[in-house]
Structure formats: structure tokens, C-alpha cells
Amino acid sequence: MPYVCADYSKYKFVNVCWNSENGIATVTLKRPPVNSLTAEFLRELSSLLLDLEKDETQGLIFTSEFDEKVFSAGLDFKELYRPSIDHAKEFMSLLHSFSFRLSCTAYPTVAVINGHAPAGGCIIPLCCEYRIGLNNFNIGLNELKFGILLPDWLSSLMIHTIGSRNAEQAILSGTLFSSEHALRIGLVDEIAPTKEVALEKATAFLNKAKIVNRSLRLDAKLHLRRPILQEFQKDIENELAKNVSLLMSDKVQQSLDAHIKILKEKRGN
Ligand SMILES: CCCCC/C=C\C/C=C\CC/C=C/CC(=O)SCCNC(=O)CCNC(=O)[C@H](O)C(C)(C)COP(=O)(O)OP(=O)(O)OC[C@H]1O[C@@H](n2cnc3c(N)ncnc32)[C@H](O)[C@@H]1OP(=O)(O)O
């Protein structure tokens, strides 16, 4: 059985619960108020994946502390509004490297999506091998509605998950899907009535993975995911520069400004 070496209590934005009997780590995202992705959060998540790898984790479950509300609200609007060029570069690089790392972990991965997962909030679930949703949430890549062209690796993850035809329709229409609709198109693999049931289902998926030889399984995973991994590795410098200039563009910055105002008005502040 794996021996836990890392000090998981050092992490600020996640709670890691290690099951020493089965080697499964349940990682609860807890960056208030809505688990939006900042550079600091991404740095922490990347470092966590390395710790889990070193500890020979047998399986990883992601879920959110903000149960029945939000899994992740995507990229952090506030941090990405008028960032310095250095920060924009660092952010895009961290988003890319974390997503790549999560897409090719040696251990199997599941997302228990217990709340909304719009736009960048859908990235963690898409990088995972299996997705279990709860009812009454929205999930999808609606970036085109913000004037954001998806990086190729992200489109590729969506194609891998729901097939080219569904991905084309979903991305071009910028749809956020209800849980039931997400199940129909394969964006989630199962729906569970409660988080507890979802966690049981996630454990059952991870236990099935154990039957297979670990290194053989990793070879097969990397082979099956090759088209995605190639997109991640293709012309990285150019891809990151493209995303940075998109983020810094007037159009995207104006869109961020508008969304921040909408959220403020919603809260009446
Ligand atoms: C963003 C520019 C990217 C440029 C890209 C360039 C290249 C491409 C690279 C990557 C591709 C991937 C791109 C992804 C883009 C994104 O992810 S943009 C973010 C999209 N997310 C959303 O539109 C979600 C917006 N939020 C909501 O709909 C709701 O908040 C919610 C999540 C459904 C929760 O609703 P609820 O009623 O519970 O809470 P509130 O709305 O009252 O919010 C509470 C609190 O949280 C703050 N907040 C919400 N979302 C964000 C966010 N994304 N970033 C930062 N902060 C957020 C909100 O302002 C409230 O704050 P408070 O008033 O201070 O309490």
C-alpha cells in the first residue's frame, strides 16, 4: 500500500483526504467563493499532482467544497482584468502546464461535479478520465460568447470526450448544458442524486482501474490520448503567445469588464 510522504496540509486551496486502505486521494477544491482559477491556485494544483504522483496514488477524485453551488467558475475574471503582461504570460503557462499534467497522470482520475462548471470551470472535468455530475448544474465551454477562441488543446479535450460532431455544436453555440443534457451527449458519464453517491460511484470507477497493470494502463492511456497530448505539445511558445495577446486584447478586456459589472449588479454592490 502506498506510503504518504507529502505534507498535504500545506495546501491552501484544496483539502486532500487520503484513504490509506485503497490509496485513493479525494481532493476538495476550496478557493472561496467559487473556485475560480488564479495563478496561485493553478500553481498549487500542479504541485499537488506531483506530490500525488510521488506518493503512488492509486486514484484521484476532484470535487468542490461549495456543494450544490459551484464546482469551479472558470478563470478568475478579476485577476485577468488588466493584468501585467508578465502576469498574463505566467497565468497562461500555468493553465497549460497544469491541464497537460492532469491529462496524462499515471493514476486514474474522476471529477465529481457537484455544482456549475462553466468555461474554464470545465477544464478539470475534461482532463479527468471520468465525470460524475449532480443534478441542477450547468457545464460547458461557452468561451465563444466571451469572444474567446479556445486553445487547440481544449477543443481537443472536448472532441475526445463528446466526439467531433457534438463538440462542434457545443463549442460553436457556446452552450452551457444542464446535467441531463450533459449526460445525453457524454459530457458527464453518470448523474448521481447526492455527493455521497457520486463519491461511491467515483470509487467504483477507480477500483475497476486497479484490475489493470499500472504501467500497461498508463501506456494505453497515453496512446489513447495522443491526439490531445500532441495538441498540448504543438508549438507551445506560439500557442501561449496567441493566448496572451487574446487575453490582453481590448475586446476580451471589455468583455471581462462587462462580466465583472454583471456579477457586481447581481449582488447589488
Ligand atoms: C477570462 C479571459 C480569458 C482569456 C483567454 C485567452 C485564451 C484562452 C485560454 C483559456 C481558455 C479557457 C477560457 C476560459 C474563460 C473563463 O473561464 S472566463 C470565466 C467564465 N465563468 C463564468 O462566466 C462564471 C461567472 N460566474 C457565475 O456565473 C456565478 O458566479 C456562479 C459561478 C454560477 C455562482 O453563482 P452564485 O450566485 O452562487 O454566486 P455569485 O454570482 O454571487 O458570485 C459569488 C462571488 O464570486 C465571484 N465570481 C463569480 N465568478 C467569478 C469568476 N469567474 N472569477 C472571479 N470571481 C468570480 C462574484 O463576483 C462574487 O464575488 P463577490 O461579489 O465579491 O462576493
Image (spheres, grey):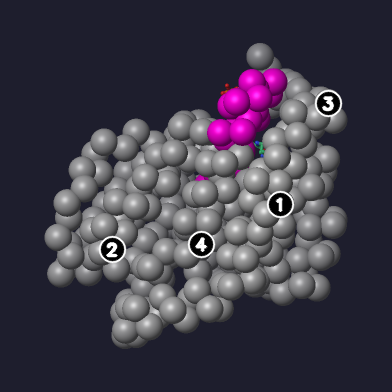
User: In the rendered image, which residue does mark 1 sit on?
Assistant: 151
Amino acid of disc 1: Pro
**Element type at mark 1:** loop
Q: Nearer the viewer, residue 159 or 227?
A: 227
Mark 4 neighbour class, 10 Å CA radius: few under 14, some 14 to 19, many 20 or more:
many
| Mark sitting on residue 35 | none
| Mark sitting on residue 250 | 3
Front label number (1 vs 2): 1
Mark 1 C-beta to ligand 1 under 8 Å: yes
Q: Earlier in the sequence, mark 1 or mark 4?
A: 4
Task: State left or right for residue 95 relative to residue 242.
Answer: left
Task: State left or right for residue 225 relative to residue 253.
Answer: left
Amino acid of disc 2: Thr
| Mark sitting on residue 103 | 4
Amino acid of disc 3: Asp
* The C terminus sits in image quarter: top right
Q: Earlier in the sequence, mark 2 or mark 3?
A: 2
Mark 1 neighbour class, 10 Å CA radius: few under 14, some 14 to 19, many 20 or more:
some
Q: Residue at 57%, 72% (x, y): give it.
A: 225
Q: Earlier in the sequence, mark 1 or mark 2?
A: 2
Mark 3 neighbour class, 10 Å CA radius: few under 14, some 14 to 19, many 20 or more:
few
Residues under numbered marks 1 and 2 in contact, where contact means CB atoms less than 8 Å apart: no
Q: Nearer the viewer, residue 263 or 154?
A: 154
How far across and down, in percent of the image, does residue 249 sit?
80, 29
How far across and down, in percent of the image, does residue 128 sit?
50, 63
Q: CA distance from mark 1 to mark 3?
A: 19 Å
Mark 2 neighbour class, 10 Å CA radius: few under 14, some 14 to 19, many 20 or more:
many
**Element type at mark 3:** helix
**Element type at mark 4:** helix
User: In the rendered image, which residue does mark 2 sit on?
Assistant: 57
Q: Which residues are magenta?
A: 71-91
Q: CA distance from mark 1 to mark 2?
A: 30 Å
